[in-house]
Amino acid sequence: MNLLGARALAWTMLALCLVYLLLPLAVTLLVSFSPSAVFELPHDRLVLRWYERIGQLDGLADSVVLTLEVAVVATAVSLGLGTLAAIAVVRGRFPGRGAVATFLVSPLMLPGLVIGIAILQWFRFLGLREALPSLLLAHVVVVLPFVVRTLVAGLARFDFALIDAARTLGLSYGQAVRRVMVPVLAPSFITGGLFGFLASVDNYPVSIFLTDVYHRTLPIQLLQWLGESPDPTVAAVSSLIIGLTIVVLVIGDRLVGLNRMAGL
Amino acid sequence: MRSAGWLSLPAGLYCLAFFAVPLALLLFESVSGPQGLTGAYYADFFGSAFAWGVLFRTLWLALTTTLFCLLIAYPAAFALTWTRGWVQSLLVGLLLLPLSLSVIVKAFGWTVLLRGNGLINVTLQALHLTDAPLRLLFTPAGLLIGIVNIFLPFMVLPIFASVGQLDGRLTDAAATLGGRPFYVFRRVIVPLTWPGVLAGMTLVFSLSIAAYVIPTLLMGDAFQTLPTTVATSFLYLQDPHRGAVAGVVLLVLAVLAVLASSALGRRTELS
């Protein structure tokens, strides 16, 4: 194969790759505007009927509120714990620093379902059966690795001599941290927080074991609907989730840039 | 800042209490019988044809997914590095969108696409490639189409990063010295992009051995893998010992994948 052929192949694969990746999203959007209830595609006109029906979905509002509540609290706690831990790993001079960093990031590499079931068994052993505290405690384990990973990478690039320089120029230690270190680290903070937040909002393998009839997070509620009676209303909810994800990515792009978010 | 190490205590203790201890308990549950420690649950599990089927399906699914992702992502990542400016930003954004989106939403899209009267079949018939609708939903082919789709971005992005670091002067030099294109590709480009390939393969393999939603929705209960066995054992069958054993086996596979990957990475660094 000559070079030209190889280039043509690469471009074709990129095009196919993008079409393939976006296909399920496009279909979900199309179905959500479909006049038919049985997912007939293609269709000739667009209707908003399924969006109007979203309000009548049982349990949607509750699950959205619960999902956001859990994600916000878990992200806030993780940012606190994660920032301290990242500073310790990058700045501390203690044996096993690498091991601590690996340990804190390891929930990301291990199967979520196994972590979920292990936490469930542990909570039962402790006698904790309420869904909300269980979800809050467990989701920190989901979010924390994202925060630690990006903050450790961000801090490793930060030159701590800049703080000394700022102090030489007359700033107090607190001012130096606030005016020099915080702005430099803000992108890592935002990226880790955003991805951690999304991971919590999307999480099903841990949540599936900790939810009960009255406390269903959005992914668990969606799974339930898909199992029971998939109709275009579910497509309308899914389309809103797609829209929300785009908004989050655009905000992330404006704040830190997409390449940084992709870890490139 | 000498005492900075203490700052890792809160996070470390938290992960110990809500991550390490629960996993240790699961491990303990898989070996604790009514009369103390026992290997009986493992013997039961590995003594059944069912378990070997589960193990085989899990590994088959993960390996095939990794292979297909690599075949699509490797050339695509090169083309992505040839783009510039806002076009590249847009394309990276289009990769990040499905990556950040809930698996359940994408799984819903695929159930619609793969149906007998779904878009794929309608298109195939309109192009006269097939006469009757193909059965895709609840078949291994449909499952692969869905699962490769979910994990593909995790392969493209690391390879894209390593191709981006490729020094064009090296390939030029190799060509100037008389290397034919395929030789340059095999001896220069492949070794230099290997770290990205390895990272992508590790990610996709680890994620796909743990996949639960896609096999459940696109294949149903007939296709049991380790994750679906873990979930059904605990949620429906109330058989925590079998679930714990399946969970530990899955955990061991995930850890082995990470260890194998870092060993491979180190070996290439040395050579």
Image (spheres, rainbow, N blue to C red):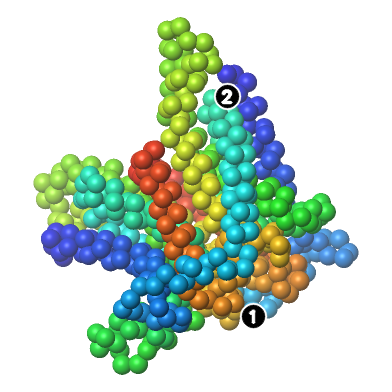
Where disc 1 sits, the SS reads: helix
Label 1 packing within 10 angstroms: few (<14), some (14-19), many (20+):
few
Q: Secondary structure at mark 2?
A: loop
Q: Which mark is residue A93?
A: 2
Residue in the foreground of this view, choosing between A240 and B10: A240
Of all chains, the one bearing label 2 is: A
Q: Is residue B161 above or below residue A26?
A: above
Residue A56 placement: quadrant: bottom right
* Figure check: B18 above or below A180: below
- Point out the frontmost of discs 1 and 2: 2
Estimate the x, y position of residue A71 in percent, counting from the top left: 59, 48
Q: Amino acid under label 2?
A: Arg
Residue for badge 1: B49
For the question of whether residue B127 can be seen, the reply is yes
Residue B93, compared with residue A38, is above or below; it is above
What's the amino acid at mark 1? Ala
x, y (%) of residue B214? Answer: 51, 70
Tag count = 2
Residue A248's mark? none
**Image coordinates for residue B47, horizontal then vertical, percent:** 69, 76
Q: Is residue B84 left or right of residue B271?
A: left
**The image quarter in which residue A41 lies:** bottom left
Q: CA distance from mark 1 to mark 2?
A: 52 Å
B62 or A135, nearer to the observer: A135
- The quarter of the image holding the C terminus of chain A is top left
| Residue B83 drawn at (x, y percent) | 21, 50
Which residue reaches farthest bottom?
A: B131
Q: Residue furthest right?
A: B35
